[in-house]
Image (cartoon, rainbow, N blue to C red):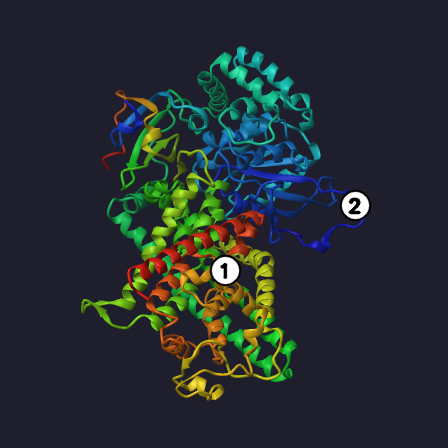
């Protein structure tokens, strides 16, 4: 599964950042490393881009690039903040 | 803010030739600029980084490297960045400034500003800077937003650099930061973090260090971090002046070790170091409840599919209101002051060209400059509020889908939409865009938007040449044309952005990576300072060009001088003069269709401007324009609305601004050629409207682009491409219309 098709509010763990070149490097440098926890917080009203919550910060990337980040659903911890 | 002032340099301190340089670095949204203001007082200067048109703000501060002495130092605000690694020239600025490369002076100290609530992520840039072995201190800013407060002594020990808690907005910790700057300048101690890079990577770096150019004058300790920088930056970049040898060495290492793992290895090692120091392991992140619940709640409304767009529409509307309606009284005030000064000059100085030069050339020129200030100030105040509150990022988030179709960033929305008011402030607003290419593309298309200066021309032409009747009995022709012109300009702008973005300013698509910072109450003082500095900047640089152009245009249309004000005579054209109140005063000559003799031509007709207008005639004739429109076009370079008064001047209608429109409209409507045909038919009107909608005949726009790009190349390109496009469009309309049997 990738970040592009994750459900809102689900707690995820990054397993791989594919993609290439400068943008992949930038994602890594912003802290999207394998093992990092991430949540898709919202989707822009026009369907793109999406907003991520990672390392306590809100980052926005487009779906096209979100599709390069593969994630697994974190089963041990259920999201607490998604149904407030 | 204690004891600052230019007169306080203590006597007897030996002044070195160049004062020490202190850099201010940090991620975006860390309050870096507010801290810069708090440290620098009111003395900021704005310039450009060497070799690149990215704004460089610097200020003189006083430092006390030795007890009891005082010395000036240069504080330089680096562009906000998440990392030192670079793929574009503007991203490379920070590295060059820190290393003292490319005409940058070698800095004595770097202050890294971090957000106290975002320590781990902000530490990535900090660590990169520390690796470069440059004396570093950390301002842990926005400390008032976190609780409990981290212990600074503990944090300093962990990170190996002095950390000072600050809140730039609340002016907390500024004195302590000053103390730390002094101490750091005295000790000049550089950090040396030890990172556990994989042995294989370190071995491979050897090759790259050997390929580093000697002109970079790197110390032994800096070679490895710079080699790492080259390795991670080169390969997918747009950097210039990188020796081929260095590229080759990096390529080789990337191939051997695999690019994929290489970037990961480097970034991972750094984050491992950070997490080890900050005791925040992998559980950090989304598993934590959101730290800023207020921002979350606001976002639930502002990013809502329906409500969010409503608010967005409202903000856009407010922007329009401010630029059109709020700026209007101020613009009128400027105009009134200008006319008052002009009338004062006319009253006090005897008739002659010096009087006209002063009144129309110089005072008029100054007016042409100052008249932009209300819109510039308002636009930048609004941009400041949007940026500072955190809403600008949300605007980009909401509208990115649309803007990316044009190959632009969502942030380009505000400058684009401001183009409806005036291209000049809109072009200045492109500074909020990060990429130089995006700025350029926006600058090149914004002048196509229907700005408010075009409106008087549209009103004149539509009013004069199109009947106030309805099409099919219900569609008002004049109103529809006006709406149509707005629609036309939007389509033209979008098309131009699409085409130019794929040709002239072609660049690789850069994916969006946008931080949505927490909402904060805007810091009004900082915004006010920015508005003042932008306005000054405009007056000083673009203003000079605009003033000179106005004087030159005045001279073109005013020489040689006629001995007396004389009635207008138009050769070759018979006029059916319907005397209007304004006209009767000067031209009570020809009742009926009588061709007037060329006895006394009006000044303007023998002026170089008229010669230009006539010289233009062969070029503009296929568009249906006569030489008088040519003169009007020349005059409209001062500002588009000057077209109206220049046309009035050609017809000898007394130039009284407000009243000129009515008689001029009559004249243009009733004008007949010898054969009785109308020189200004609706078809000519349509052609003229199209020309004005597209052509960038506005020296102010060209001047401000020259100011922003530091070269005449882009303003000239803009002038040429809009000119050709306008000509072709008008040609198609006029000749097409004639083919269809219209006259």
Residue B41 location in percent, x, y?
60, 52
The C terminus of chain B - image quarter? bottom left
Q: Dot 2 lies on which element?
A: loop
Position of B62 compared to A60: left or right?
Answer: right
Residue B127 is tagged as none
The Cα–Cα distance between marks 2 and 1, rounded to whole angstroms, is: 52 Å
> B469 or B365: which is nearer to us?
B469
Residue B540 location in percent, x, y?
60, 58
Residue B698 is tagged as 1
Which mark is nearer the camera, 2 or 1?
A: 1
Indicate the chain on which mark 1 is placed.
B
The outermost residue toward the left is: B473
The answer to whether residue B196 shows anywhere in this view is no
Answer with the quarter of the image where residue B346 lies: bottom right
Image position of B463 with respect to B293: above or below: below
Kindly identify which residue carries mark 2. B13
Q: At 55% from the left edge and 74% from the top edge, which residue is drawn?
A: B604
Q: Dot 1 lies on which element?
A: loop
Q: At 46% from the left edge and 27% from the top edge, which residue is drawn?
A: A22
Position of B353 compared to B720: left or right?
Answer: right
Indicate the chain on which mark 2 is placed.
B
Mark 2 crowdedness (10 Å alpha carbons): few <14, some 14-19, many ≥20: few
Mark 1 crowdedness (10 Å alpha carbons): few <14, some 14-19, many ≥20: many
Residues marked 2 and 1, same chain: yes
């Amino acid at each position: 599964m990738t970040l592009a098709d994750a459900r809102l509010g689900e707690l995820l763990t990054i397993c791989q950042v594919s993609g290439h070149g400068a943008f992949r490097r930038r994602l890594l440098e912003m802290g999207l490393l394998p093992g990092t926890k991430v949540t898709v917080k919202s989707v822009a009203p026009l369907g793109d881009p999406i907003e991520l919550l990672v390392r306590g910060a809100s980052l926005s990337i487009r779906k096209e690039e979100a599709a390069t980040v593969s994630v697994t659903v974190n089963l041990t911890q259920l999201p607490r903040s998604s149904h407030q | 803010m204690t004891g600052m002032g230019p007169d306080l340099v203590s006597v007897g301190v030996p002044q070195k030739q160049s004062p020490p340089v202190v850099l201010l670095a940090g991620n975006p949204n860390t309050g870096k600029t507010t801290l810069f203001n708090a440290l620098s007082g009111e003395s900021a200067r704005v310039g450009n980084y060497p070799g690149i048109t990215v704004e460089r703000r610097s200020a003189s501060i006083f430092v006390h490297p030795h007890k009891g002495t005082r010395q000036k130092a240069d504080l330089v605000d680096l562009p906000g960045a998440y990392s030192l690694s670079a793929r574009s020239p503007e991203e490379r600025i920070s590295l060059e400034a820190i290393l003292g490369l490319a005409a940058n002076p070698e800095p004595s100290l770097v202050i890294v500003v971090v957000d106290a609530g975002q320590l781990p992520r902000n530490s990535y840039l900090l660590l990169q800077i520390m690796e470069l072995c440059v004396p570093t201190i950390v301002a842990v800013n926005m400390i008032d937003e976190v609780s409990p407060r981290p212990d600074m002594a503990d944090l300093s020990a962990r990170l190996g650099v002095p950390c000072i808690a600050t809140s730039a907005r609340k002016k907390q910790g500024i004195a302590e930061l000053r103390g730390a700057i002094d101490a750091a300048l005295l000790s000049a101690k550089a950090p040396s973090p030890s990172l556990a890079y994989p042995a294989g990577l370190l071995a491979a770096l050897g090759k790259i260090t050997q390929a580093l150019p000697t002109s970079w004058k790197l110390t032994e300790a800096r070679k490895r971090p710079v080699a790492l920088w080259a390795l991670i930056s080169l390969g997918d970049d747009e950097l210039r002046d990188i020796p081929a040898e260095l590229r080759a060495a990096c390529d080789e290492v990337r191939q051997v070790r695999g690019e994929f793992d290489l970037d990961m290895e480097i970034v991972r090692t750094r984050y491992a170091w950070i997490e080890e120091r900050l005791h925040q392991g992998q559980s950090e992140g989304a598993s934590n409840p959101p730290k800023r619940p207020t921002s979350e709640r606001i976002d639930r409304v502002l990013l809502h599919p329906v409500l969010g767009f409503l608010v967005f529409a409202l903000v856009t509307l407010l922007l329009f209101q401010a630029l059109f309606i709020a700026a209007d009284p101020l613009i009128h005030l400027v105009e009134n002051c200008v006319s008052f000064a002009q009338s004062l000059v006319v009253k006090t100085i005897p008739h002659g060209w010096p009087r006209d030069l002063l009144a129309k050339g110089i005072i008029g020129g100054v007016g042409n400059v100052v008249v932009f200030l209300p819109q510039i100030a308002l636009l930048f105040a609004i941009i400041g509020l949007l940026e500072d509150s955190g809403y600008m990022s949300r605007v980009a988030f909401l509208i990115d889908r649309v803007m990316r179709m044009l190959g632009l960033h969502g942030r380009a929305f505000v400058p684009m939409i401001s183009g409806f008011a005036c291209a000049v402030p809109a072009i200045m607003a492109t500074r909020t865009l990060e990429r130089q290419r995006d700025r350029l593309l926006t600058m090149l298309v914004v002048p196509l938007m229907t700005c408010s200066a075009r409106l008087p021309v549209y009103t004149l032409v539509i009013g004069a040449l199109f009947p106030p009747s309805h099409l099919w009995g219900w569609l008002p022709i004049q109103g529809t044309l006006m709406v149509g012109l707005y629609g036309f300009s939007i389509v033209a702008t979008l098309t131009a952005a699409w085409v130019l973005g794929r040709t002239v300013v072609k660049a690789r698509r850069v994916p969006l990576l946008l931080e949505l910072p927490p909402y904060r109450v805007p810091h009004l003082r900082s915004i006010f300072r920015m508005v003042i500095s932008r306005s000054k900047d405009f007056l000083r640089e673009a203003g000079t060009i605009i003033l000179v152009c106005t004087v030159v245009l005045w001279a073109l249309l005013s020489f040689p001088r006629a001995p007396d004000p004389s009635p207008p005579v138009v050769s070759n054209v018979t006029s059916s003069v319907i005397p209007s109140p304004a006209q009767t005063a000067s031209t009570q000559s020809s009742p009926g269709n009588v061709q007037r003799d060329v006895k006394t031509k009006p000044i303007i007709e023998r002026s170089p401007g008229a010669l230009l207008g006539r010289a233009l005639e062969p070029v503009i004739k296929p568009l249906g324009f006569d030489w008088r429109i040519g003169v009007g076009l020349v005059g409209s370079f001062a500002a588009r609305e000057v077209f109206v008064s220049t046309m009035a001047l050609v017809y000898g209608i007394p130039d009284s601004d407000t009243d000129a429109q009515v008689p001029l409209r009559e004249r243009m409507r009733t004008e007949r050629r010898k054969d009785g045909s109308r020189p200004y038919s609706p078809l000519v009107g349509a052609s003229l409207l199209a020309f004005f909608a597209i052509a960038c005949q506005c020296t102010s726009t060209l001047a401000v682009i020259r100011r922003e790009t530091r070269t005449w190349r882009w303003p000239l390109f803009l002038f040429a491409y809009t000119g050709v496009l306008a000509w072709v469009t008008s040609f198609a309309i006029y000749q097409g219309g004639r083919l269809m049997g219209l006259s």
